[in-house]
Amino acid sequence: MYTTPYRDWFLTRIDIADSIYKTYKKIGEADAQIVICCAIGTLSAMRWPNAEDNRRFIEFLTKFTPQTQIISLPIVIEKFFDEGDSASAEKLIKQYYPSRSDYNGLWYLDSQVLPEPLQLESLDSIQIDQTELNIAKVLSKETQSDGKEEVNPKWVNNLLAKGKDKRQVIREASYAALIYTDFRCGLVHWHEGKNGVTSNPYYPGRRDAPIYENQPTPPTDEFIKKFANQYNYSYDAVRTAFTETKRRLYFPYEYIRDLMMESSSHAFDDWESRDEPPPYQKIDVWAEKETQTWWITKYKKRSKNT
């Protein structure tokens, strides 16, 4: 097989990551995950050599492991709030959570003592993850009556609000996008998950799938200092007062490893299915240099500099 050298190269990266994780356990988890993400980044660069790193990385995952197109409901709700689109956020909360407290997080308050977060092991009853179309159906209310409920093809146009395409916001909350923006970039630049992703769960739980955990999330340091100076409060008082409970997503090492192994395997199979297999030193037949519509963005045109 002409992809054998590349398969061997990728499996060596997996072996290196496994060795780091087995040797250092939790303290080496981020380092092991960085190795695997970098290896996938290399394969995505081979496929789309002229594309932006984030676009091709996310495209690689959504193309070869379509299950990563699933949307994180808590994070997409948070994104809508951040965009100032509270109507869409509230609509999703009402649709998918039994009560408002289930979205806000469950806490036991005890005077001024910081409460322990309560992790929900199983959230199937509130359908924590929904596909993009299911979310769009809730927001647009545009359905067809052909014996089953489906989203109208015009739902994208119906989801326009204040000039912002909601489809973009929804896809930014997909597992594929979060693995790149909040997980991979967080690990590389800060050695921890950022925004909607955490690298430090209180209760790690299962290892073969992503898990959610309610965690205290303080405001930014800039906000705390500005508010404290303006209203003459102490730093700690402002930090405590504005700390919110937010549900954070944790990607265990085993899940990331298995996901990237599956994605790379499908990618290599796709490479070998090309009509004109080149010698393994050449990847021209597999590389896509044509302008395409990227899954993570609605824009079809791509400049030579991206």
Image (cartoon, rainbow, N blue to C red):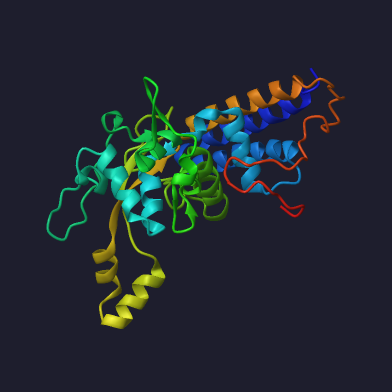
Tell me if I can see residue 40 in this picture.
yes
Foreground of the two, 193 or 50: 50
Q: Residue at x 36, y 77 (%)?
A: 226
Residue 237 occupies quadrant: bottom left
Q: Which image quarter holds the N terminus?
A: top right
Please give left or right for residue 198 compared with residue 235 in the image.
right
* Position above or below: 133 against 269: below
Q: Position of residue 154 (x, y in %)?
A: 48, 39
Foreground of the two, 170 or 154: 154
Q: Position of residue 264 (x, y in %)?
A: 64, 28
Please give left or right for residue 5 compared with residue 59 in the image.
right
Q: Position of residue 298 (x, y in %)?
A: 58, 46
**How many labels, in total?**
0
* Position above or below: 124 against 29: above
Please give left or right for residue 299 compared with residue 122 in the image.
right
Residue furthest toward the front? 145
Tell me if I can see residue 131 in this picture.
no
Residue 102 occupies quadrant: top left
Q: Position of residue 7 (x, y in %)?
A: 71, 25
Q: Residue at x 48, y 55 (%)?
A: 164
Q: Residue at x 27, y 76 (%)?
A: 234
Please give left or right for residue 296 compared with residue 114 in the image.
right
Q: Residue at x 68, y 30 (%)?
A: 10
Residue furthest toward the left? 111
